[in-house]
Amino acid sequence: MIYGNRIMTQGALGEDIKRLQQRLKNLNVPMETVDGHFGSQTIRAVKSFQYQNSLKPDGIVGPHTYKALELADFPPVLIEHLSVLINLSMRSLSLLENGKLIRQYPVAIGKPETPSPVGLFELMEKISNPGGVLGTRWMGINIDAYGIHGTPNPELIGQAVSHGCIRMHNWNVEVLYPLLPLGAKVEIKKQLTVEG
């Protein structure tokens, strides 16, 4: 689930603010209206959520708050039953348990000159905090130097801009990283529909 590509602060407007407000409401954080305006009501709700989750209650939605929002009601899963399905046409990564959709995340994919590989692969390598263009996590698959990783440029998520790797928001790849064991299946397809 994604709420936005930006740090959210007082005065912000948009659909991503609506998604944030709805998420807070779904988590039973007091939220009267879902109006897409990051005003005093939203600041109070964000501060309340941050306090409940041992975060600095500053009312600003940045990487730590995004990650906490994602993990807040993550369902219990058996990691040996998890796999990843990447839909290049939708620019999305789906986390599946026994083929059933658990979570879906937006991703950046390979540009036309350096497309992302298509096929069924396995997770072969995991590195925490690789740095640079790889962001905060790297999960390599069993083909050349391709993998799933974070990015220091969150504004590029949803675009075809990589050298073939799958890029995720750092806060999303940090959620996925501990769940996927080495050997987990990673399927990359050009186009498909995921049943959830």
Image (spheres, grey):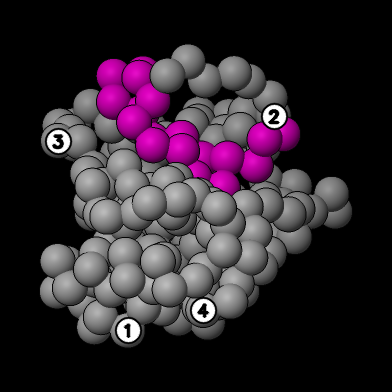
- Residue 65 in view: no
Of the two numbered discs 2 and 1 in the rendering, the one whose residue sits closer to the viewer = 1
For the stretch drawn in magenta, the main secondary structure is strand
Q: Is residue 87 above or below residue 51?
A: above
Return the residue at label 3.
76
Mark 2 residue element: loop
Quarter-of-image position of residue 133: bottom right
Q: CA distance from mark 1 to mark 3?
A: 29 Å
Q: Residues within 10 Å of mark 3 (few under 14, many from 20)?
A: few
Identified by mark 1, the residue type is Asp
Mark 1 residue element: loop
Which residues lie in the magenta part? 89-106
Q: Is residue 156 above or below residue 148?
A: below
Q: Is residue 163 left or right of residue 37?
A: right
Q: Position of residue 63 (x, y in %)?
A: 40, 72
Of the two numbered discs 1 and 3 in the rendering, the one whose residue sits closer to the viewer = 1
Q: CA distance from mark 4 to mark 3?
A: 34 Å
Q: CA distance from mark 3 to mark 2?
A: 29 Å
Q: What residue occupies the far front of the structure in this picture?
A: 32
Q: Residues within 10 Å of mark 1 (few under 14, many from 20)?
A: some
**Residue name at image x 60 percent, y 72 percent:** 12
Identified by mark 2, the residue type is Lys
Return the residue at label 1.
58
Return the residue at label 4.
10
Given residues 62 and 168, the one toward you in this image is: 62
Quarter-of-image position of residue 184: top left
**Do the residues bearing badges 2 and 1 touch, measured as CB atoms within 8 Å?**
no
> Which badge, 2 or 4, is on the more N-terminal residue?
4
Q: Is residue 22 left or right of residue 70?
A: right
Mark 4 residue element: loop
> Which badge, 3 or 2, is on the more N-terminal residue?
3
